[in-house]
Structures are given as structure tokens and as C-alpha cells.
Image (cartoon, grey):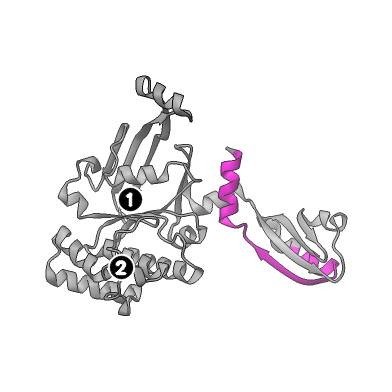
Amino acid sequence: MTGIGTDCIIVDGLVKHFRIHRRAAGLGASLRGLVRRRYDVVRAVDDISFNIASGEVVGFLGPNGAGKTTTLKCLSGLLHPSAGRVRVLGHDPARRQPDFLGAITLVMGQRNQLFWDLPAMETFLVNQAIYRVPPTQFRAALERLVVLLDLGDLLDKQVRQLSLGERMRCELAAALLHEPQVLFLDEPTLGLDVAGQAAIRGFLASYANERGATILLTSHYMADVTALASRVVLIDGGTLRYDGSLADLVATHAPYRLVRITLDGKADAETLAPYGDVASIEGPEAVLRVPRESTRDVAGRLLAELPVVDVSIQDVPVEDIVREVFARD
């Protein structure tokens, strides 16, 4: 694996605003709009800055409408920033230079680049021509991707006949045949079942490890982020909320763990209160929030002092922590 090196992605004061035409319903409003058009300014991205080192995998998180996809489009050159500076591998993405385009890829889970009525292999051959991949390199890359993504008999099947998970695997193969250094992934596991999500995550981890690729990943499935990234960038309303390690985020916003117990009899809050913050009670089952440093001692006391049938200690789900960060803001 190529080690993490100098900055590969630089985002400095990125701003992207859109002017949206606003018109009320009705014929009268339509006629007035011909003479006097009214616009709203949408601040999709509003002065965010961060750097990503070569070989780093970063989770890019935020609620719907936070500005994640807009940022990825600016980094891939599909949109021009309203203000600020972005650089990817030393290139200005907005110039869309061939060297830049050949070194990146953008995968969007809700977009389809495969030809619907043709086999996936046809798209692969088109991409070979677009990126001018030499035949020897193309065959080697294709063989490697077929194995990693378990494409098997999918190459010659009409795309419309593939399942969602099969199409997504073929989408990734099409996007990676030119072996890009930088991957912008926007919801790459969107709509997949648990097995499909796990397959895609495993492949991306292998690709990043083998190729030393730099990955910026957005996903609403926190398992994608925790499996691939040790650093997260959180944005909301187009502004930066957090940039740091996932472990530090958990330690800062969830300095406790969850102790789940099942008692031999009905649980009650008054009895459990001395052991921790009672999060929930349902019959004989209860969940306590306990400071991380006290978890072991509290579990031992529970086992010694109460009729405990079962006990387990769990970390707070990362998605709950992220949700809490945005709720606080």
C-alpha cells in the first residue's frame, strides 16, 4: 500500500451559490414572471476548507441538502465554484484537463453510466477508448476487477437484466478501469441489501489498500464510513461542522458506553439509577449510559448486586453520534 503523503485534495474557502427562479402558482403568476422574474439565492456550499492527503480515505457526512454532492461536483470539475479555491492532484478541476480527468473518477449511486440496453462490457470498451487505456493495461485491469467484484457471467448480460447490486458492481468496474488515483464516491451503496453493501465495502477497502488511492466518500450508511475511513468531515447547511478523526468524534460527543442488561424480574429506574443514566426500560430489559472509564466496574457491580440474567456492553452507534452533532448545532 502507498503511504499517506502530501496533500492530494485542497479545498480553500469553497463557496457555491445557485440562483433559483421562484414563481407562485397560477396563470397570473406565470404572466407576471415573463416581465419580472424573482430569484432566491441558495447557499449550497458556504466557505468550507479542508485538505486530504494522498492515500487517505475520508468520510464526508451531512444530512440531505448539506452540500456534499455539490462539493464533490466542484472537486470533479462538473461545477465551477462561486468563490474560493479547489485543487486536486495540483489541477484546477474546473479546467477539466485530460491529465486530471484520467486520474479521478466520480461514482454516484443514484446515477447510471452503463448503457441500459447493452451488456456492461460495451460500456467498458467505450471507457477504454475515452480514457485511451492501452489494450494490455485494459485487459489486466478488467481481469483484476472481475475477480475483486465477482462479475463472473455479468459482463455479457444486458444491463436491464441485472439486479441493483449487480449493476452497482458493474458501475464501479466501469469507473475504475482506468485505475484512477482519486475516487469521489457519492452514496456508492445506495439501495443495496446488506450483502451488496458488504461486497462493495470490501472491494473499496481492497482497492484503496492495493492502489494507495485517495477516497472521499459520502454515505448515509454509517457502516460504509466506519469500515473504510478513520477521518470524517461533517458539513451542514453548506458549512463545516467537524473535521477530525472518527475516534475523537466518538470520544467527544459520546463519552459513555451502553450497558444492556436483562434481569430476573421487572427492571425499575429507581433501582438502576445508582449504576448509571437509565436510557430505557422495557420489562426485564434496561439500557444504561455509563462513562467509558467506569464501564467495567459498573458491569461487575450489576452482576454482583442484582439478579442479572444477561449483560452486554456496546459503543454508541456512530449514526446516533452524528445525528446528535447536527441536532446540537
Label 2 packing within 10 angstroms: few (<14), some (14-19), many (20+) = few
Mark 1 = which residue?
53
Which residue in the rendered view is the most extreme toward the front? 27
Give the residue at x 71% y 55%. Answer: 289
Amino acid under disc 1: Ala
Q: CA distance from mark 1 to mark 2?
A: 17 Å
Using the rendered view, name the quadrant where residue 180 is placed. bottom left
Q: Position of residue 69 (x, y in %)?
A: 39, 46
Which residue in the rendered view is the most extreme toward the bottom? 153
Nearest to N terminus: mark 1 or mark 2: 1
Mark carried by residue 258: none
Q: Is residue 305 magenta?
A: yes
Above or below, 314 against 273 in this view is below
Above or below, 233 against 23 in this view is below
Give the residue at x 28% y 47%. Answer: 76
Mark 2 = which residue?
210
166 vs 327, left or right, is left
Quadrant of the image containing the N terminus: bottom left
Give the residue at x 46% y 69%. Answer: 198
What is the span of residues highlighted in magenta in the rendered image? 299-328
Quadrant of the image containing the C terminus: top right
Q: Secondary structure at mark 2?
A: helix
Q: Nearer the viewer, residue 200 or 254?
A: 200
Q: Is residue 116 magenta?
A: no
51 vs 233, left or right, is left
The answer to whether one can see residue 51 in this image is: no
Give the residue at x 15% y 64%. Answer: 133
The answer to whether one can see residue 42 in this image is: yes
Above or below, 29 against 140 in this view is above
